[in-house]
Amino acid sequence: MSISIRQRMADIAEMSTDRPAVVGFDENSVEQVLTWRELAERSGRRADALVDAAARGTGPGVVAIEANNTIQAVVDIVAVLSAELPLLPLNPASPAPEREKLLNFIGQTYGQAQLIDAEADADADRPGRSPASMANRIAYLLPTGGSSGRPKIAIRPGPLVYDPHQVPLPLRRRAGWRSGQRQLILGPLHHAAPFTTLLDGLLDGNTTVLPPYFLPAWTVELVERYAVEWIQLTPAHMRTILMLLQPDPASFTSVRTVMHTAASCDSFTKKRWIELVGPQHLYEVYSSTENIGGTLVRGDEWQQRPGTVGRGFFTKISIRDEAGNRLGPGQTGKVFMRAGRVSRGDAYLGSQVLETTADGFASVGDFGWLDEDGYLFLAPRRHDVINVGGEKVYPNEVEAQLLEHPAVLDAVVVATEEQLLGSTVGAYVVCNPGSSVSSGELMAHCRAGLVNYKVPTRVTFVDQVPRSAAGKLERWRLAGQRG
């Protein structure tokens, strides 16, 4: 039987009054503990204020919050979901122009999308739109990137409820999840995997250790100090820990599961982490915010098939050529998925439209091949999306920002290899005749309108960028070069 989020928080608080729900840290890295009773009370009061604003018609259509890795952000998340209002977790580092663009874009479809102060009610003098009509349709909206300057939003139908048969997600249960465990989340809460891991943890009575930022030595210290049992991170985190430390396997004796998501993991990092935590405790997930399906692979499976991202988890995988024809084992093509029992989002907002087939498969544009046993291996990306430590960057958005500079005549953005993150953003720029600008000035110009991971780390000045006779950019001509 399903129950509301608010009731679930109250039930856990009654059973575990003074047990920690979240262990957070202030700006000086001093521990702050939020008990289950405090979480239920604080989120309940905040939910009441949001519901009152909605009833008066002064609340926004979508409630946006700054999704910092803080206790206050967790309270806000629980409050909005308890009020059964559509939640939009925002990247707190996003510049004002980018944030305004996102809020306006969502507002065009769902009415006013407004950032609400953590301690204040909606502005009673500012007209809003009662979200009552959409409350039954949307739980939360997750921004997943943008192309040509337009955002892309994955939408989770709502309202969100607690169902013991669905929490945690079956994929996490398969990977050794246990109710009431101690979990460490290193990724930012405005990302899909950390966000949904937090939600499953809250609904399942876990204690979440939530550092506000990532430091390799501190991460290992937290694992030891709190006897962490479950870790959710990215290959970038894993590589950084290995590069800056020489971690001892004894530091991870409490850990049952390390689950990495968001980007591909190189073989060196994978093998070393298998040594640290054991092959039965390291899991890799390949999926997307669009929730069209996913794969799961454990460390010992990966050892038998190095490079695989696993087999479909309640997901059928179909590899197809450009004409949509199915390809056999060993043949590389576009990866299509069709989810079965795994929850699948059925709403999507943005200019980046999923490619779908008549028989219900969908693709986010990745390429790969299957072996005879159905294990998926990803091929180098053929589309233009740049993966920067798990963050998706659409070149058109960065190019549009560069072209706003008066000294820039033309620009093309590509992925450049980087040891830690795997890829960063590189730019090739053509200046207007008679104009002069430095690479530092262009980086500063991009930083003024884009979040940091979208800012080029290298700018190369060229006489022209590769284009076809039709004027289309040919980024593939720059593949393998350093921007």
Image (spheres, rainbow, N blue to C red):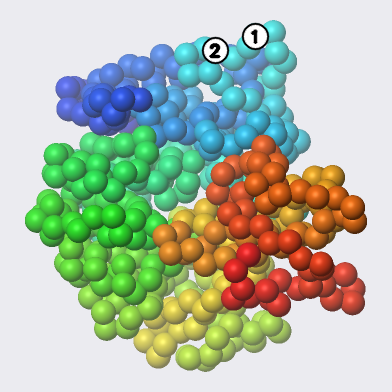
71 displayed left or right of 250: right
Three-letter residue code for mark 1? Ala
Above or below, 355 against 380 in this view is above
Relative to 309, does residue 331 appear above or below in the rendering?
Answer: below
Q: Nearer the viewer, residue 269 or 432?
A: 432
Question: Alpha-carbon neighbours of circle 2 within 10 Å: few (<14), some, or many (≥20)?
Answer: some
Image point (62%, 53%), residue name: 456
Q: Is there CB contact under 8 Å for labels 2 and 1? A: yes
In the image, residue 252 lies at what x, y percent? 15, 54
Quadrant (top left/top right/bottom left/bottom right) for the C terminus: bottom right
Which label number is shown at residue 121? 2
Badge 1 element: loop
| Residue visible at 59% across and 76% down in the picture | 480
User: Closest to the observer: 240 or 434?
Assistant: 434
Q: Position of residue 482 (x, y in %)?
A: 60, 69
Residue 36: mark: none
Q: Residue at x 85, y 50 (%)?
A: 435
Is any atom of residue 125 visible in this view? Answer: yes
Viewer-closest of 35 and 203: 35
The quarter of the displayed image where residue 189 is located: top left
* Image spot of residue 437 (x, y percent): 76, 48
What residue is shown with label 1? 124
In the image, 336: left or right of 411? left
Going by the numbered disc 2, the residue's amino acid type is Asp
Report the Cα–Cα distance between label 2 and label 1.
8 Å
Image position of 146 with respect to 386: above or below:
above
